[in-house]
Amino acid sequence: MKAPQLTEDARVALQERDRAVEKQVAGILASFKGEKGELIPLLQRVQQTFGYLPEPAMKQVADFVHVPASTVFGIGTFYAQFKLVPTGRNIVKVCRGTGCYVRGSPRILTELEKELGIKDGQTTADMEYTIETVACFGSCALAPVMVVNEKVHGRMTPDKVKKSVGKKS
Amino acid sequence: MSFQEIKKQAALQWQEIQRSPRPRVLIGTATCGMASGAEDIMQTLKTDLAKHGIQADIVEVGCIGLCYAEPLIEVVKPGKPSVFYGNLTPELTSEIVRDWLAGDNPRPDLALGTRGEGTLEGIPRLLDLPVLKPQVRVALRNCGNIDPTNIYHYMANGGYEGLTRALNMKPQEVIDELKKSGLRGRGGAGFPTGMKWQFCHDAPGTMKYIVCNADEGDPGAFMDRAVMEGDPHAVLEGMLIGAYAIGASEGYIYIRAEYPLAIKRLLVALRQMEECGLSGDNILGTGFNFHFKIKEGAGAFVCGEETALMASIEGSRGMPRSRPPFPAQSGLWGKPTNINNVETWANVSAILEKGAGWYASYGTEKSKGTKTFSLVGKVVRTGLIEVPMGIKLRDIIYGIGGGILGGKEYKAVQTGGPSGGCLPASVLDSPVDFEALAVAGSIMGSGGMVVMDEATCMVDVARYFLTFTQSESCGKCVMCRYGTKQMLDILQDIVEGKGRPGDIELLQELGDAVKNGSLCALGGTAPNPALTTIRYFRDEYEAHIKEKRCPALACRALITFYIAPEKCQGCGICARACPSEAIKGGKRMVHVIDNAKCIKCGTCLDVCPAKFSAVAIASGVTVKVPAEPVPVGGKA
């Protein structure tokens, strides 16, 4: 399945968001010293702010800690936490840990993908939802588990998926 | 305030709580509790207590380990044993407040068990329940009993006694105590902790580091999360003791970002330690300095490996390097470094408090003490458990876990996560310790224990784990990077019915090559799930390859759904629920599934009323069913 094209509104909003990036990153950098050991915490703060790692921000960070931009990009792609594309306003994470897997997480993901019309890793056209899968949340005793933004939903069923992200069509 | 005075105050506060004339309700608000609705329960409690005019304290506690029964509360009425209630809903909570807190009926029908002095008729004692009786809690000693955000609670229960004792000993004496206890690293490999400390202690240099590995990455494991959420001080105290023994003045807690609550609890705990003079410079006036730092992981399974973890702290990609030099000689920033995982540290504080002899009295000859496990999967009572080493797998799964969910047949238990193996019924009676699990082809690992039943396909499980390790391989070693990919491709073919003769042997050959050709434990153990399933469940592999049949009826490509004509009553529920309109039927007609349209989602199987149970799965055989709908019972 191809990722859906963004709507015009979503695209404009995104551009505006990007313009504000540089200023905001400067604000983040102000509370760091510029040591290489700070690279990951720095990127985590950037992502916290923007929901992803905008390219200009990565370059800014690289200059700040005196490493090539490629190093920052390498870290951005190495760790699962970092995203290089913007995500939706709501992030729905489906756990695919072992406990969840044997208790039916593949069906939870299928149902979610069907309900939102996107695949794992994609964002809906209105930038409302992003689907992600996570290796394990550590709530295995309540498998299968799904997390909407920060809220953990345990003992999921395909029916409960519909209720928690149900589109009002 | 001196430390003695702080301790006195802590004891007073705890006593006051215990003797309080006010009733108390303890509610589990660790991640599991929250995920099953503890917040709603708390709201109901507040409203209903106010409604009945009851002055009571609500205390948030960590995970007591009975995750299957979450949300869970413990109701303490002065002069009575406390009562645990599980599987609560807001409605049931209201009833408990009305009948037991406002009234005089402890509701034995809802209660799980009692704790403390005295008994209540019709309610068993909690610790006599089969789920708790075989357990011994060391690392989890305070989880669910104390408020994890209150350092006084920890102190009043023996907290920081171990540190005080250690600070009165010479560092070498502390290390000797650890050696005597027989504690082995709880992160997976089981290296003797005392020996590890000795190496770092003996390494030259004045700047040394301590690291707590809290990057619990094994899917299916959450012991460390529960300890940090439920008793953060136990871990931090252990680190202080280790730092003193080794001569370290700085320490890192490397914790996964997926554990926001644990991070929050650690931060609160660190602040309290500082206030009590338990961290920073001149700890407890002894001249011992130690500073903590928290580093959030960014999501990479390989960072559980110690050299990769250190690379990540230093701000690089988390890629392991070859050893030697071992971290004890040259670790973080090139300085001697000692890494232990969360559970190990939580054991250290208990060992120093209660003594090496006490700890070594549990367990087997070579594996001392206790081990936590997260018991999950297809077992009746899922949860967090801690048992003495040497207990039989059977006693864990059938005793504590209550057997297999839905009365199904046991097939395997997976220990050690993606690095471990799947163990069949024939090894259920072997003891759980480092050596016995290795003989059986698995590993202790950090303690994930995932139970699988007859409906779990072992080839698919092997494929699942390879998907995980393949995508988490850091890519440094060729055999790990490409070997796991090849293994995954072969397994994918097999579950899709495209397996070829010779695939099993090829998997074994590749498995050996990946094991031998990888630098770190990720690659060194990645083939384990495939190799153990081949060893114990070869017939399932052969059924997939030779007969194109999945014995567990799980692999989508190898199964077909059908409706048994003699059972179908023509109710039409399945046809209406089918998302791909693959079911034909009509009123009082036997329904038929069109296999060309069927997407094998299993919805029809779920919705077919239990009294009919007409939908079934077949694999490797052709089931005779009518091609078109026919009248039910053969009559018009």
Image (cartoon, coloured by chain):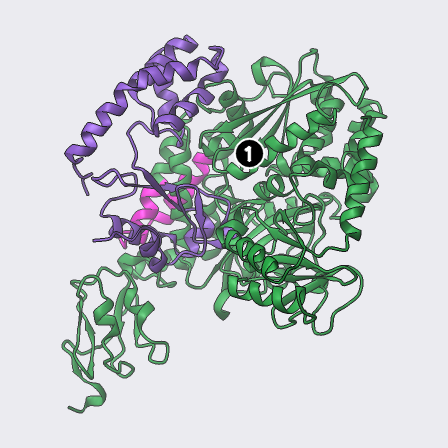
Chain colours: A purple, B green
In the depicted structure, whether residue A19 falls above or below residue A159? above
Farthest residue to the bottom: give it: B635
Q: Residue at image x 38%, y 36%?
A: B471
Q: Is residue B488 above or below residue B94?
A: above
The reply, left or right, for residue B236 in relation to residue B319 is: right
Q: Quadrant of the N terminus of chain B?
A: top right
Look at the image and say whether residue B504 sits in the magenta stretch. Answer: yes
Q: Please say if B360 is above or below B610.
A: above
| Residue nearest the viewer, comparing A129 with B417 | A129
Which x, y percent locates residue A21? 31, 19
Tell me if residue B2 can be seen: yes
Q: Residue at x 76, y 24 (%)?
A: B245
- Callout 1 secondary element: helix
Amino acid identity at mark 1: Ile
Tell me the residue at 73%/21% (across/down): B246
**Most prominent secondary structure in the magenta stretch?**
helix
Give whichever of B562, B462 is nearer the camera: B562
Q: Which residues are magenta?
A: B487-515
Left or right: where does residue B398 sit relative to residue B544?
right
Q: Position of residue B592 (x, y in %)?
A: 19, 74
Q: Quadrant of the C terminus of chain B?
A: bottom left
> Is A151 inside the magenta-drawn segment?
no
Q: Residue A123, located in which quarter of the rendered image?
A: top left
Chain where mark 1 sits: B
Residue B459, how many percent across, how many down? 39, 53
Residue for badge 1: B263
Task: Answer left or right for A111 relative to B165.
Answer: left
Task: Locate residue B278: give its quadrant.
Answer: top right
